[in-house]
Structure formats: structure tokens, C-alpha cells
Image (spheres, rainbow, N blue to C red):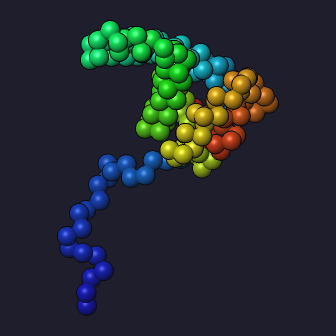
Amino acid sequence: MHSTISPYTPPGSPTDPGEPEPLAVVPASKWLRFYNGLTDGLLSLGLTIIVYVLLRLAVGIVFGARGTEYIATVPMPYVGLAVYVGYYTLLESLTGQTVGKWMTGTIVVNGRGTKASFLQVLGRTLARLIPFEFVTFLGEDGRGLHDRLAQTYVVRSR
């Protein structure tokens, strides 16, 4: 008889974490969400200023005075928008956390309590651009409109 297990299959390890355990889908408190938003907003603003200065410097070095004049016509809010979308999308899609969420021990998950997909994170990020969306997490359940639209939750991770 032939064995159904290949002799070349590596043995399992008792320390192998395998799939991560789903987190309980209990939304983080409104105060944690507020702190996350405040921290990430200030960090995003600081990054925007740094990127804008570095962009002007790089364009000035590469293209000279003419390039500097041209880049000065690009409104800073456009740079801020790119940094904001990049900040949230990159960090939340790779780690499930932004700096604010890392500091408060919270993480973005899907409805099953596992890692949110890239499209869910992108949807969350774009939904944050809806005017006055930032106050929607103050509702009864503590979920913001960006959470509901993307079918995600921010939960305690520690």
C-alpha cells in the first residue's frame, strides 16, 4: 500500500504559529479612536510638510530654478492628500495598524476578526475623505462611516 503522506513533507513544528487567531470583533472605545485619529492626523500633517519640502528641494536640484518655480504652483493640499492616502493605505494594508493604532494597541480587522484586505483598507481610507466623516465614530457603536462602508472594525489587539 502507498502512504498518502509524502516522505518529503517536512514535519510540523510545535512552535509553528500557523494561521493567526481571529481577534474578537469588539470595537475599540471612542476615546481610543479619537486618540488614533489625533495622532495619525498630526503625523500625517508633519509628513506632508516634510514631503513638500523634500519634493521642492529634489525638483530644484534636478531641474533648477525653472523646476522650483513650477513645483511651487502645486498646492500643498494635493501633496497632503497623497501623503494621507499613502500613509493610511500602506500602513493598514501591511500591518493593520497606523502609528496611532500601534500606540493604543488597536488594529483594523474584517468582520471575521482577521486581517482586512487591501481593498477594504483602500475603501476605508477613501471614505475618510468624506466631509465631516471624522465625527461619525461618535455614534452608539463607535464605528465610523469608513468602518461601516469597508465592513471593518478597529479592535483591541493587546
Image point (64%, 28%), residue name: 129
Front residue (pair 145, 47): 47
Front residue (pair 36, 146): 146
Residue 103 visible in the shown view: no
Point out residue 88 in the picture as x, y percentages from the top left corner: 51, 30
89 shown above or below 34: below
Left or right: residue 38 versus residue 11 is right
Image point (80%, 30%), residue name: 140
| Rendered-image quadrant of the N terminus | bottom left
Q: What is the tally of numbered marks visible in this picture?
A: 0
Image point (49%, 26%), residue name: 82
Point out residue 135 in the picture as x, y percentages from the top left corner: 73, 23
Image point (45%, 47%), residue name: 20
53 shown above or below 99: above
Point out residue 29 in the picture as x, y percentages from the top left corner: 67, 26
21 shown above or below 29: below
Point out residue 44 in the picture as x, y percentages from the top left corner: 50, 18
Rendering quarter of residue 94: top left
Residue 67 visible in the shown view: yes
Left or right: residue 74 versus residue 139 is left
Left or right: residue 140 versus residue 46 is right
Residue that protrudes farthest toward the front in the picture: 66
